[in-house]
Image (cartoon, helix red, strand yellow):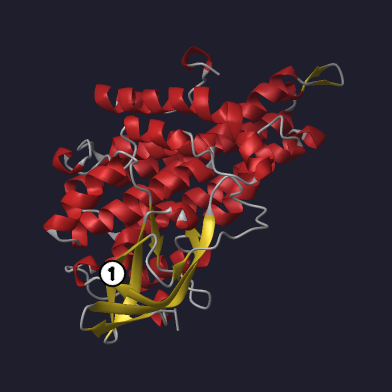
Amino acid sequence: MSKSEYKNVDYYNLDDLYTEDERAIRDTVRDFVDNEVIPIIEKYNQDMKFPMHLIPKMGELGLFGPTLPVEYGGMGINNIAYGLIMQELERGDSGVRSFASVQSALVMYPIYTYGSEEQKRFWLPKLAAAEKIGCFGLTEPDFGSNPGGMITKAEKVSDGYLLNGAKMWITNGTIADVAVVWAKLDGKVKGFLVEKGTKGFTAPETKGKLSLRASVTSELVFEDCLIPAENILPNSGGLKSPLSCLTQARYGIAWGVIGMAMHCYNTVLEYTKSRVQFGKPLAAFQITQEKLAFMLTEITKAQLLDYRLAQMKDNGTMRPQQVSMAKRNNCELAKTVASMAREMLGANGILDEYPIMRHLNNIESVKTYEGTHEMHTLILGEDVTGFSAFE
């Protein structure tokens, strides 16, 4: 689908609010997704492989760390433009958006925020240009929603830090050149840069996934890994450091899943307009129109939620709990839209000729990672009541 053929889902004319630069960035990524992602992604999904050949082009387009300053390889764009990038990438596939989210929000952001000047100048331009790939190691086999329970530990030794433990469900882990790993040092959470090839560090790929198949998911294993002293993130400290990174990633997800919902909506809209039953198109039936109206309304509400969230992020007033609301709402919306679209396409909904089943499988992971629906519910609940229900 070329740019001229793409039907934008923008019922409340948000394009009128976006600046010319924001629209130009969105349209550039939209063309990339239409011409280079959508035509090939079903095969990669079936083969359970990530389309590695897309990475250099994504680097050329500036899709990694684009909100960071130019001096570190970024483009210095605002968070509306960044959100629109995530939206378009996930319209292509959650795995493609996940790659960019991890590289930007979970690798470049912590290095920029908690790293030394030397670390920033060495790693950030390389990560931005896709010369290096990164991953983020927080979740452990026995500690997902409770990251504070981590058992991965770092011990200070004469020539650096000795790292032991394991991480699970790590996007990009097997192909990463550097892992931002969170471990307890003297009981306090600190960040470490663990480079590929470090003795005792392995990153086996997770096989057998039925969701996020066009994405590399891995385990990270550390057995007496000696990490050079200069590879600790000096300004990190406490669980708030990795959680701040998750806030950045959740922000991108809140935008990304709208792209998924838009793709499902557009697909089912065109299908029902052309599919004839009982002498007229499916789109001419009241029940079909009710479902389409519901989809469009929920997508529009999610777009407005994200637009305001982006404004607050840019002016420095955004709170993590507000990101939780957007992530929670928009993932639920995307799952509902994808499920309804599958039903509305009937038997055709399970074919890879249409993107619906792939999106529906992917949202099962996206809704869960970076905080489950239930965890974000409790985050909001604590914020409005003052009572924590986590324990």
From the viewer's perspective, is residue 203 above or below residue 273?
below
Image quadrant in which the N terminus is located: top right
The secondary structure type at the circle numbered 1 is strand
Residue sitting at x 24%, y 84%: 157
Image position of 209 (left or right of 257): right
Q: Residue 100: where, in percent of width, then height?
A: 40, 44
Please indicate whether residue 107 sits to the left or right of residue 145 in the image: left
Q: Is residue 391 above or below residue 66?
A: below
State the residue lying farthest toward the bottom. Answer: 186
Crowdedness near tag 1: few (<14), some (14–19) or many (≥20) residues, C-alpha within 10 Å = many
| Residue 49 visible in rendering | yes
Residue 56 drawn at (x, y percent): 39, 34
Residue drawn at x 23%, y 39% is 74
Please state which of residues 145 and 41 is positioned toward the viewer in this rendering. Answer: 41
Q: Quadrant of residue 289?
A: top right
Residue tagged 1: 191
The amino acid pointed to by label 1 is: Gly
**Residue 65 visible, this orientation:** no
131 or 186, which is in the foreground?
131
- Residue name at image x 77 percent, y 21 percent: 275
Q: Give the camera-side residue of 276 and 50.
A: 50
Q: Residue furthest top?
A: 4
Indicate whether 153 appears above or below 246. below
Quadrant including the C terminus: bottom left
> Measured from the top left, where is residue 376 in percent x and y?
44, 64
